Amino acid sequence: MGSRLRGGSLRAVPVWGRAAGAGALVAVAVAVAVATGPGAEGAAAPGKAPGGGAARAAVTAQPLALPAPTGRYPVGTATLHLTDRQRSDPWVAGRSHRELMVSVRYPATRDAGRFPRAPQLTKDEAAAFDALNSFSDHVPAGQVPWGATLTHAHQGAPVARPRGHRLPVVLYSPGAGDPRSLGSTLCDELASRGYVVVTVDHTYEAPAVQFPDGRVAHSVLRAELAKAQRAGRITELLEKVSAVRVADTRFVLDELARTGRGSVLPPGLRGVLDLDAVGMFGQSAGGFTAVQTMHDDRRIKAAVNMDGVMGYTQRDDDPSHPSTAGRDGVDRPLLLMGMAGDDHHSVASWGAVWRHSAARGTWLRDLTLRGGRHASYTDAEALIPQIGRQLGLPHKDVTEMIGAVRPERAIAAERAYVTAFFDRWLRGGDGALLDGPSARYPEVRFVP
């Protein structure tokens, strides 16, 4: 989700602000400060918001619903608890290892409906997300039952595996301060089209990450921001957040490759993943993570950045403090997808990646969602209109959050172009949709 830094000053703004990649991480930490403690790990007390006060009862009439995927397969899901014992946790002193929670989406057999649908957030994760409430300018905390939303992925459903074929893999990294599940619409869509989709929570950055034994790790970005501000080391903080995310992603790839008794996958998924056909995408800081990981790790064959700045700066137009992806470019296919006004001409870090990648002969596309906002590339595109109707929000508030593009059109366009991209580069499909503007999706502008 992330936020936006304006005018070179630190200011937390809603997720619907301008592109929020590395620079946005700092502003997110300001918002996190409202909800979380200075780094303590543990669940909030019953009936209490993680920030302290009694949580108000949600008053929306119905649980929020995510759009059903459109592919030929139902979707199954499994949850993995991964522990990197070769790396101490970079955010919490004294933790000798790094723990991650990961979800795996996959195409399931036709009887998947016999298995329960996975919630988007656990109860404790939902409480932390509500208390953080990045929509707070328009949606008061305690008014939305975030924990009641179900994804379209069925827990433990059998895998549908095309005979004799392994399945391409796509990794997903969320925006700064977001849970991995806020990209469920696109992740479920790709799984319904035959991909294995692996989503990663970046522990102590997401509002809350719940482990199988009930422990809940809350964000520590408030304390990190305060330290960075006092020391005048904001750039170093941005670099650290990016480095941690890339290290998390590379560790997940290592774990997925383990075989035999060391496999971290449930039995039905073992031998199913094609780790020679791996792509990655993400929104905001997750989009930057996808590109930087592809730069650093040749296992990533193609990447999609959805509205994420790719440098360590507080302003979109500031070319200082480039990432190595910005200095070197990338040599594998890259798709940029921006909100209205964000492209490789207006966002300095995008321009740097574009120029250096083009010089290497890399396949590149830059698409703009007309009328879209930053949060249009998350589940907010589907959820905010429902919240608006149930809470009676003014239309201008809804458009401020997710833009003027019709939500169903934005979702359809994002599904189409992301799927076409990975079909082209992970499956050898024609990907003709990526060759130029389409009358089917007038909401999408190809940036020259």
Image (cartoon, helix red, strand yellow):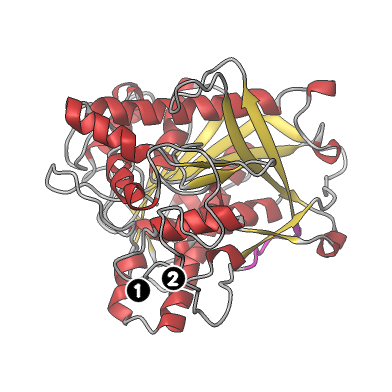
The residue that appears at 45% across and 22% down in the rendered structure is 93
Residue 83 at x, y = what percent? 64, 26
Q: Does the stretch in magenta take in 423?
A: no
Residue 329 at x, y = what percent? 35, 26
Local crowd size for mark 2, using a 10 Å CA cut-off: few (<14), some (14–19), many (≥20): many
Amino acid type indicated by mark 2: Ile
Q: Secondary structure at mark 2?
A: helix
Q: Depth check: 175 or 288 in front?
A: 175
Q: Depth check: 16 or 364 in front?
A: 16
Left or right: 97 in relation to 296:
right
**Over which residues does the magenta segment extend?**
68-75
Q: Secondary structure at mark 1?
A: helix
Point out which mark residue 398 bears. Answer: 1
The residue that appears at 56% across and 52% down in the rendered structure is 181
In the picture shown, does residue 292 fall above or below 209?
above
CB atoms of marks 2 and 1 within 8 Å: yes
| Upstream in sequence: badge 2 or badge 1 | 2
Point out which mark residue 420 bears. Answer: none
Q: Depth check: 14 or 284 in front?
A: 14
The residue that appears at 52% across and 35% down in the rendered structure is 302
Q: Residue furthest left?
A: 7
Left or right: 358 in relation to 317:
right
Residue 305 at x, y = what percent? 42, 43
